[in-house]
Amino acid sequence: MEKVPNEYSSQRHVGWDINAAEIASLRRCMDYNDEACRPMHPSIQSKKNSVQVMHARPIGEDHSPDMMVKDSSRPGNSVGCGRSSGRNYAIAHPSYLKTLGQAHSGWIFGAIAELVDNSRDAKATKLEISIDMLYSKTAGKDIPMLSIIDDGHGMSHQEIVRMISFGHVQPEADDPDHIGRFGIGFKTGAMRLGKDALVLTQTANSRSIAFLSQSLNEGKDNLEIPVVSYRRIGQFMEVDTSVQNESSAKYNLKVIKEFSPFDKYLIGEKAGLFSGNSTGTQIFIWNLDVWGSNYSLQWEAGMSGGSSFHQGDILIRSRRIRSRPGQISQKVPLDYSLRSYLEVIFFDPRMKIYVQGARVKCRPLAKSLNNTIIENGIVMGKPVQLTLGRSQLEWEQANCGMFLYWHGRLIEAYKRVGSMVHNGDNGRGIVGVVDVTDLIDDGKGHVWVHNSKQGFQDCEAYAELEKWLGERADEYLDKFVDTIQLRKGNALYKPDHEWVQCDKCRKWRMLSPDFDSKTLPLEWFCYMKPFNGRCEMPEREVEHGVITIASKRSGHNYTIDSKEFKCELPQKPIWKSEGGGDKESSPSEEEDNIPFLSKKRRSCPPRSCKKS
């Protein structure tokens, strides 16, 4: 008789623990080659097709067989016990799916971000997000369907079961490039966006379909989540009988086709997107969340032909601005435009992202600022690095604040600190970028991040970080902003450096100051001008601890030398004239000719930048 595998003898995170008596019973009654017998034991079947949420109990404790409740009316569908002598257990009621969706009730883009995180964790290089119309036989009309498709490594049967389970063990290894942590991201994200979600995923050797649906479970007492898995046999995919029997697979597939817009032809069409041995995951969500008499999301197809004049986008219909202390601006596209949000969602963007078929131009914020300075400090004994600078775009929109990243993912945007909080216009256009992974992860398995990944918990580390960021921001305002010399005529201030990303190696390359970035093609590679290099060459880093000033700013009659600048105490600024000679300009000359000094916000000795 074949021994019961360990994965069935200790299932602490899927819902059932099998004690010694149950294992002995299994060995007496079940031959693992007998497929008809396998779905009848709830301890095993709960791992395969029906998800239960139960408190783990120690292996070896007695569990009275008469306390088990088994629903055998459907093949392959078993329901766990609801109680035990002296013990209370919990099962997942279908209404819990609605509760999960409330995790992102304040901002629906947080739900989309959960699914984007999963694609990044799967090492995807390409992600496509779109809303298209699809005919629903249940509704009898075309309905909108949100699709999120990536080319990551996909999920095996065990991995997709873990994804649809309600919470699972946190990763033991602290991977700085891994965002998933709490085991609920897919459920909270999908159920916030719509009532029904179908997942189609493929690895090199398997393919699985999972159906998380409120419509299917309406009126039921226990949550049913159909899963069908296949394994590769040569060039074909066949039902994987090592994880389910034929009757279970047929029943689950029938349920999926009955309660979703997917028939066998549409499923085959979507599976055909996995060309050859390619891998990836496709998520489809319908019965989308509503806003009044319409949908919460509004989508625009954009112009065809790759036009950059009007690209498609997915918008929040309400266009409401998120509340932030000290904010007065009502123009924050990041709050209601998915394209704008995805531009800055990652600290170091590498994945190609498409919204409504048009490429998102991702921006590494730390490399997109003017008058950039890098501050290094210690907060609660842990190193923190802050990049501060001025953004022309944020100046025009009257925004400012800190962008806080955790594991490379944006958690908080436009967080005002220091004097920015008390004066709505103070620090206008000033942006700070910092990754706080080391500080927020306590090293003991706990992280001070909300499970929605849209804010930080109230803790000492976060309070000390706020204080440190406020001090650094105020110092920057004193030294560089209050004495910035502005010019009349709405002059544009370009970033200190302009960057372009290779579409093959995904590395960022710095453009030369005299190169016009508008001439770059839609798809650019390292061998092209002006880099003229190879993908194997490392990325260039800007030296830490220096402030750089761009050598080319449109609208200026005068330019500053392109070399690096270091901050020193006040001296008269040296300007390079058009004739090539250096001269010292008096305050009166500066005011009469070109620059005018901006209004002081605090009393402090004037400072300027001098060439080192």
Image (tube, rainbow, N blue to C red):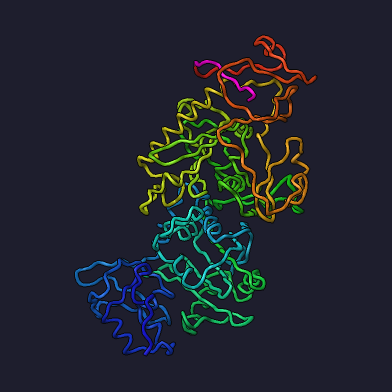
The magenta region covers 603-612
Q: Name the image quarter holding residue 148.
A: bottom right
Q: Residue furthest front?
A: 612
Q: Is residue 522 left or right of residue 457?
A: right
Is 159 drawn above or below residue 343 in the view shown? below
Q: Is residue 610 magenta?
A: yes
Q: Can residue 399 be seen? A: no
Name the quadrant containing residue 390: top right
Instruction: Locate residue 108 relative to residue 397 in the image: left or right.
Output: left
Query: Total of numbered circles in the picture?
Result: 0
Rendering coords of residue 140 (x, y %): 59, 67
In-front residue for pair 105/586 = 586
**Dominant SS in magenta:** loop
Q: Quadrant of the C terminus?
A: top right
Camera-side residue: 214 or 523?
523
Report the front residue among 438 and 139: 438
Residue at 78% x, 43% y: name it: 519
Residue pushed farthest top? 588
Residue 147 screen position, x and y as percent:
59, 61
Residue 49 location, x and y as percent? 44, 75
Residue 102 placement, left or right of 231: left
Name the residue: 33% across, 87% down: 27
- The relative height of residue 176 versus residue 145 in the rendered view (above or below) is above
The reply to whether residue 527 is visible in this rendering is yes
Quadrant location of the N terminus in the rendered image: bottom left
